[in-house]
Amino acid sequence: MMWLVQKPADLEKLVGEIEIDLDDTFTHIDVSTGEVITLTREEVRAAEDKLPLGHFHKCQKENIERAICILEDEHGL
């Protein structure tokens, strides 16, 4: 099966994200928007474990919700 990127990724931003990629981060490219999304290992783990979001900061909650969408997306990269 082949997926088509609807919007190209910003290569400068992508290279910047890759250059600063740390062991505790996960970088994802949203193929429908071209957006580069960087999540922490903690945020991805919370999404995988389906942890309650109550004790996380607002920005972490948003990232965990994004991580859930990425994990559930069968076409994600």
Image: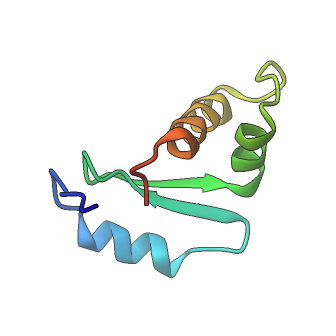
Figure check: 49 above or below 44: above
Foreground pick, 44 / 20: 44
Residue furthest top in the image:
54
Foreground pick, 16 / 27: 27
Quarter containing the N terminus: bottom left
Residue positioned 36% across, 70% down in the render:
14
Residue furthest bottom in the image:
19
* Structure colour scheme: rainbow
Q: Position of residue 65 (x, y in %)?
A: 59, 31
Q: Position of residue 38 (x, y in %)?
A: 53, 56
Q: Position of residue 23 (x, y in %)?
A: 72, 74
Figure check: 54 above or below 41: above
Residue positioned 81% across, 38% down in the render:
49
Foreground pick, 21 / 4: 4
Figure check: 46 above or below 77: above
Quarter containing the C terminus: bottom left
Horizontal side of residue 17 vs 26, given as left or right: left
Horizontal side of residue 50 vs 10, given as left or right: right
Figure check: 10 above or below 40: below
Image label count: 0
Residue positioned 52% across, 62% down in the render:
27
In which quarter of the view is residue 41 placed?
bottom right
Q: Position of residue 34 (x, y in %)?
A: 26, 54
Residue positioned 25% across, 46% down in the render:
32
In which quarter of the view is residue 43 placed?
top right
Horizontal side of residue 56 vs 12, given as left or right: right
Horizontal side of residue 66 vs 61, given as left or right: left
